[in-house]
Image (cartoon, helix red, strand yellow):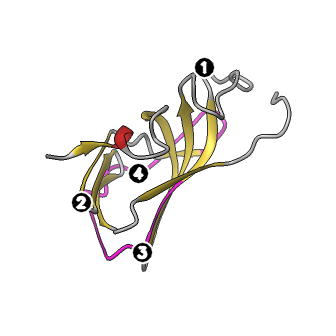
Amino acid sequence: MRAHYRSLPGFEKVALEDSYVLDIEARPGGLLFRLDLFLHPGHPDFGPPRGDDRACFRPALLSFDEVRSLAWTGQGTPPARDANGEIDYGAIDEFTWTAGEFTLVGDWGRIQVNSPRGPRLDIEAVDGPQP
């Protein structure tokens, strides 16, 4: 049985379905998603919305190291541009896993990753109040 991403350490108080994928980089041995990450109350980095945000979003990196294999299929539709002109690939609509096999799905396609270490979620520090 496949588990939901929220059962992974560090993913308990985030919502990838409500986050924005800003970039995806696949390289030998690694996979990286650059995100505008939606945080739920109770997350250590949760704070008031910044600027015109409707909720608490923080820049973050979702990464896989020691990738043994990666398959990216259905590369989906071209990215959209948001109101600020930034590229937006949509969200991570599904993220499930079992024993070192991870599956992520969104408008950008379907990525299946084999990594013994699993994913890491790094939230970038935000200094002071944001406009």
Specify whether 28 is left or right of 81: left
Q: Identity of the amino acid at label 2?
A: Ala
| Camera-nearest label, 1 or 4 | 1
| Camera-nearest label, 4 or 2 | 2
- Label 2: which residue? 99
- Label 1: which residue? 54
- Label 4: which residue? 78
Specify whether 34 is left or right of 66: right
Decide: is 78 above or below 116: above
Marks 4 and 3: in contact by CB < 8 Å?
no
Q: Earlier in the sequence, mark 3 or mark 4?
A: 3
Residue sitting at 72 percent across and 26 percent down? 50
- Look at the image and tell me in which quarter the C terminus lies: top right
Residue 64: say if magenta: yes
| Element type where label 2 sits in the image | loop
Q: Nearer the viewer, residue 131 or 102?
A: 102
Residue 95 found in image quarter: top left
| Camera-nearest label, 3 or 4 | 3
Badge 4, how many Cα within 10 Å: few under 14, some, many 20+?
few
